[in-house]
Amino acid sequence: MPFPFVLPTTSSISFTDYFSSSTHPSLPNCATTARGVVRDVLKRHKRIPPASQASHLSTVLSALQDYIPYLFALDAGLSGTSCAGEEIDLVLVKEIEVEWRSTLGATIPGREPPRIKLKSLESELFFTLSTLAYVYSLQARSQLHTLYNATLPTPEQRAAAISAAMKHFLDANAVHTYLVHRAQQWHTQPVAVDITSSVLGALAELTMAEATLITVLKDDPYPAAVVEGRNKNSKDWMFRGVEIPKVRAHLFARLCLAAAEHASKAQAMLGRAKVDEGLAKYVDDFRRTARGKACRFLGVDAELAGKTGDGIAWLRGARKELGFTAVGAEEDKKASGFSKLKKEFQEKREDRKIEKGEGWGTDAGKFEEGRVVDMLLKKWEKMNDTMEVQLVPPSEQLLASMPSGREYHTAKMFVVPALEEDAIIRMRAPPDPGDAFEGEEDDSADEDQRHSPVGAFPGTKAEYSASSNYF
């Protein structure tokens, strides 16, 4: 369940005011037009209801992919490297100034993220590529949402959705990793926390963790069984036992532990940055979910080997890793009614979010995994009390003996997109001053003024929540 990134918006800019080229005089003009399209698309995406934004992601992706080659052409002209086999002579007329709205920085609840003024082409490139990576993650999110709908997908549909989501995760990881390596050349960190080295490194680790954890989802039947049990349209009155090969259960556990290690690294990097609390909490929940899954698979491996007592201990350890204090049947009886009610409320709220397709998965699947563990724990404890009668060892001893993680993916390399040869040739011609397009949408500042709450002082819209009752 990927993090629901919010795509940033940006101010208008004309590259013709900042760059001139003797070899390709139309390059700043063409780059301005491509960027104007991106600016408009991002602003329109922001105004679309959250539940409907997934269908608009392909439009955002197309606009970014058209603009990024021009951005790298400008970068090649400044750095003196070739672009599509041609040398571009580009002169910086004056320092570039552009504004992007920070979406990962810590903000006061109810206030819109601030717009940050940046003064380099490098910052423009970093924000644009970061937005591209966010789009990839959101596309993976929309693919995984189909697995939790009321209408359960077929095995073929499930495999196709997971495969597509995995590809999107790896694409996002490639972009973040490229930016991390490029940021190593900086002498000072930028003012926007979104493109600092620590945040970029954390996002690279997080996307790899998500790509690793999703590898076990295709062959993990237990979450689907829990979803089926909550399906009101289901006609199955009895739960069918699910079998997992012993070797694969142990393999899945090691993959989950590798994902947890990546999430732990991301959490450590974010600890040094002032980021949005929702992102920091998501990373922590993801780490807990991955370790909880690993304990559950190790429990399945033990139960299949006839060690029901060890399996129960692993499941109790899984609940501790997930952050649920009450474990086991006896502890559940001692748990306060308020804690049970709170957990049920959180689960129902998550179900409603999934149905609406808005704001779901912000807990990184922690409560969903808790349901799977509870289902198996109830079943195995009943079996052990009536048939096996095995001793249940302390879960702490088993947690201390967890195996090491196993990597599954090899990080993809981000291929810098280059303009086609015919596009480079066309830019040798002088520019037409009337062809530059900076965007049709209103500037963000004008938009804030236009949509201010009734009775609010001009310029104070950010102090009001969109869901508040102003009267």
Image (cartoon, rainbow, N blue to C red):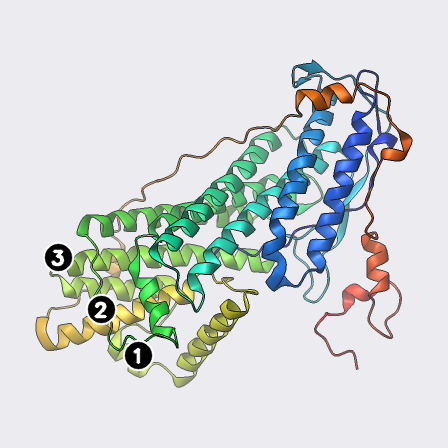
Quarter holding residue 308: bottom left
Q: CA distance from mark 2 to mark 3?
A: 19 Å
Of residues 438 and 98, which is closer to you in this image? Answer: 438
Numbered disc in front, either 3 or 1: 3
Q: Where residue 447 sits: x, y (%)?
A: 82, 58
Tell me the kind of residue under disc 3.
Answer: Ala
| Residue 245 visible (yes or no) | yes
Q: Where residue 18 sits: x, y (%)?
A: 85, 30
Q: How busy is the neighbourhood of tag 1: few (under 14 within 10 Å), some, or many (20 plus)?
A: few
Q: Where residue 307 sits: x, y (%)?
A: 13, 61
The answer to whether marks 3 and 1 mark residues whose Cβ atoms lie closer than 8 Å is no
Q: How busy is the neighbourhood of tag 2: few (under 14 within 10 Å), some, or many (20 plus)?
A: few
Please, is residue 286 above or below residue 466 in the view?
above
Q: Which residue is mark 1?
A: 332
Q: Which residue is mark 2?
A: 240
Identify the residue at image location x=57%, y=41%: 200
Which of marks 2 and 1 precedes in the sequence? 2
Q: Which residue is mark 3?
A: 305
